[in-house]
Image: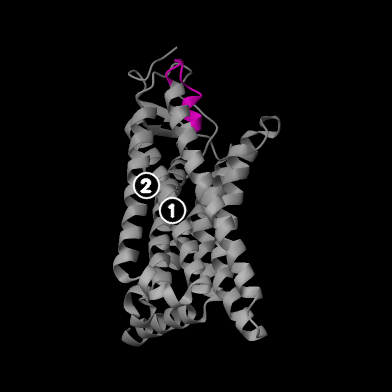
């Protein structure tokens, strides 16, 4: 038996038993992280450097790319380190920092996806009020609210979780530190306070989810009333990337957290942790760049400009 004051480190889920597979996982994570860094970095650079992309939709997309970079940099480097050096430990303070950063960036991403849904709703359902409802000041305020609420959410959950006494060991079957797995190590009924906070957060996330559903119902109704087929196609094309990103983000997270305990296994938990923490930041830039001609053109101009300089 141990308590939280005597725990100096935690043991994460080992990625593989053999050295060859560990090095293979390292190379795989290295490739994923480089691809995610390149894709999101290109989006940030293209939006920042192209004046014609200084619109609300691309402003929020830039913020979304920042959250994707944060998610990748929070979870993948430690997994790569453990695979390369054949270890599975993470320090107590490192685990706390990882929990804070992961909750912070995931919360910010979900808030930004909700705001981006509002942007699409106003653009299609209330186009005459778009400049008023989504002016530069309003966009800055909404983005600041998303980051600030995510910071507060992460701070409260991290502080509350790591104040709990832990006496169920220091190992769990996960790729990175996460609140539900830490709660399983608690030996006190005080963990109920964190469960209460998690319930409040889930209710808020569910409210955002219902807002997204309601907004898209209104969007589809408005699009179907557009008389020309070309107009309907153009309206749908502006919504499809966001809808694909939201579906990927929500479906992977929901399945990871709401799957039946009877089908849980270390290999499945590992696959799901990679699915909802690594795959969305990797695919989001690809989804947006493939469906948006303006963004593709801006990224291409940025790349060719750099080659010409060199």
Magenta range is: 180-190
Residue 29 seen in render: yes
* Residue 51, placed above or below residue 121: below
Q: Residues within 10 Å of mark 1 (few under 14, many from 20)?
A: many
In the rendered picture of this protein, how many numbered marks are placed on residues? 2
**Residue at 39% from the left image edge and 28% from the top image edge:** 161
Residue at horizontal 51 percent and vertical 60 percent from the top: 282
State which tag comes first along the sequence, 1 or 2. Answer: 1
Q: Nearer the viewer, residue 91 or 52?
A: 52
Give how far across and how far down residue 56 sits, in percent.
39, 71
Coloring scheme used: one colour
Judged from this view, the residue extending furthest toward the bottom is: 308
Q: Look at 40% across and 34% down and name the residue there.
A: 90
Q: Is residue 225 above or below residue 265?
A: below
Read off the residue under disc 2: 150
Q: Residue 145: where, in percent of width, then height?
A: 33, 53
Whether tag 1 and tag 2 are in contact, CB under 8 A, the answer is yes
Residue 210 disc label: none
Mark 1 lies on a secondary structure that is helix
What is the x, y in percent for residue 271? 61, 44
Magenta-drawn stretch contains 25: no
Taking the magenta stretch, the answer to whether it contains residue 186 is yes
Q: Quadrant of the C terminus?
A: bottom left
| Viewer-closest of 142 and 180 | 142
For label 1, the residue is 111
């Amino acid at each position: 038996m141990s308590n939280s004051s005597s725990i100096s480190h935690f043991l994460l889920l080992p990625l593989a038993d053999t050295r060859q597979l560990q090095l293979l996982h390292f190379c795989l994570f290295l490739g994923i992280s480089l691809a995610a860094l390149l894709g999101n970095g290109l989006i940030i650079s293209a939006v920042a450097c192209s004046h014609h992309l200084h619109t609300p939709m691309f402003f929020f997309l830039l913020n979304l790319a920042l959250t994707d970079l944060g998610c990748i940099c929070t979870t993948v480097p430690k997994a790569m380190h453990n695979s390369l050096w054949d270890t599975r430990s993470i320090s107590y303070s490192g685990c706390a920092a990882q929990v804070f950063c992961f909750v912070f960036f995931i919360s910010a991403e979900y808030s930004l996806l909700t705001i981006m849904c509002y942007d699409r709703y106003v653009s299609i359902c209330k186009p005459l009020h778009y400049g008023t409802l989504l002016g530069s000041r309003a966009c800055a305020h909404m983005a600041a609210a998303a980051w600030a609420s995510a910071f507060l959410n992460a701070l409260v959950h991290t502080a509350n979780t790591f104040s709990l006494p832990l006496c169920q060991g220091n190992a769990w079957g996960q790729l990175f530190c996460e609140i539900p797995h830490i709660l399983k190590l608690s030996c006190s009924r005080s963990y109920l306070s964190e469960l209460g906070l998690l319930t409040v957060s889930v209710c808020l996330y569910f409210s955002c989810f219902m807002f997204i559903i309601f907004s898209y119902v209104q969007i589809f109704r408005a699009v179907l009333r557009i008389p020309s087929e070309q107009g309907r196609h153009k309206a749908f094309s502006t919504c499809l990337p966001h809808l694909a990103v939201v579906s990927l983000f929500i479906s992977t997270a929901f399945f990871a957290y709401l799957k039946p305990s009877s089908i849980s296994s270390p290999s499945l938990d590992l696959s799901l942790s990679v699915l909802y923490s690594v795959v969305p930041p990797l695919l989001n830039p690809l989804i947006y760049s493939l469906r948006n001609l303006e963004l593709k053109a801006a990224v291409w101009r940025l790349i060719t400009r750099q080659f010409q300089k060199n």
